[in-house]
Amino acid sequence: MDYPRGLAGVVVDQTKISSTAGAHLTYAGYPIEELSEASFEEVVFLLWNTRLPNEQELYDFRADLVSKMVLPAETIRLLLYIAKEPQHPMSILRTTTSLLGTTNDVEHDEPPKILAKMLTAIAAILRIRDNEPLIAVDPNLNVVENFLYMIKGKRPDRKLTKMFSSVMILQADHEFNASTFTARVVASTFADYYSCLTAAVSALKGPLHGGANERVFEMIEEIEKEQIDPKDFVELQLKKKRKIMGFGHRIYKNGDPRAFILEEIAAELAPETGNKQYLKIQQALAKYMLERFGLHPNVDYYTALIYHCLGLDKSVFTMIFATCRTAGWLAHIMEQRRENCLIRPNSEYVGPTNQHYLRKESEEDYK
């Protein structure tokens, strides 16, 4: 029998959280193009409850999340040590996620508290690695404002907050992607939330999943530094049998709907932050890839430039992706727990058969 590698095209379960049916991304039935204009808290509420909040619910939900964006002293003490280790930031985040499960109430912590602490922990890692003092949460700011404030040390303006909120929403969930499915597999064993998130973070670290955005920016940097025509760069990489990162998608053959919106954000942000040349390179490269191979940019392509425009080092791009995706991971863990069935697929054995072990006596047997 033939089996689709990587479970491509295989429906393994049902979900009410998000859908890519017809190559259109929706969260609980709402088109992503419309939700990108919503607030982050509204979309998190939607992912967790499959409905939008009313005005009072949104106010209470936002206040609850912000109030929980405080890390225990023991967590901070350990982070001050862990975050300075000379490891990839995603390795630091993996350990930190597991750490949160030991310095918090692992059996009783609920998604709002877990999401809030994950956001603060990621901001703390960035500050510690930059040798900057940690910033306390401001109860007068919303979740996205606080996250940007705790990263940069200054309160963001409304325009930047709106842009980054859209970025977080666009990356909040995407059906049964590799890290989300990993979280659901672990959740199906009834493991705690932190264990599920640690597994998801580990999956996201891979360059074929979340790690792609780092490699996208390395590619753009190389083109700019060497002053290479994007067309020539593509052909040179192909001769070396190297993949051009940030293009193509298993589901979106005619373009990733998230990438269209992200390109607009990048086009607005790049000139304002002195990154217009990077934008020109990206647009020229995207044009050639479409003409030459019929490939469109995916979600990783423009987020790389957006993160750079925010003043973030490329080594932490995937960690920022995790910031965006945590709400979706938690939604899927909750759904898996509610309608659980242990995920345990079968495999087809293709190894040798009819093997027999013949025991050989030796002097060692008699000692």
Image (cartoon, rainbow, N blue to C red):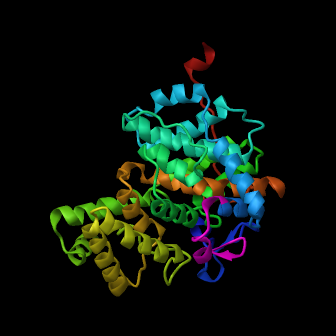
Say if the magenta span includes residue 35: yes
Q: In which quarter of the image is residue 263?
A: bottom left
Q: Can residue 59 be seen in this view?
A: yes
Name the residue: 24% across, 74% down.
Answer: 230
User: From the viewer's perspective, is 135 left or right of 72?
Assistant: left
- Residue 350 vs residue 165, the one in the foreground: 165
Report the span colored magenta: 25-41
Name which residue lies at 56% across and 48% down.
Answer: 201
Q: What is the total number of numbered labels drawn onto the structure image?
A: 0
The quarter in which the C terminus is drawn is top right
* Residue depicted at 40% across the width and 62% down the height: 306
Q: Residue furthest bottom?
A: 291
Q: 169 or 94: which is nearer to us?
A: 169
Is residue 277 magenta-colored? no
Q: Position of residue 269 (x, y in %)?
A: 37, 66
Q: Which of 324 and 158 is in front in this view?
A: 158
Q: Position of residue 298 (x, y in %)?
A: 46, 72
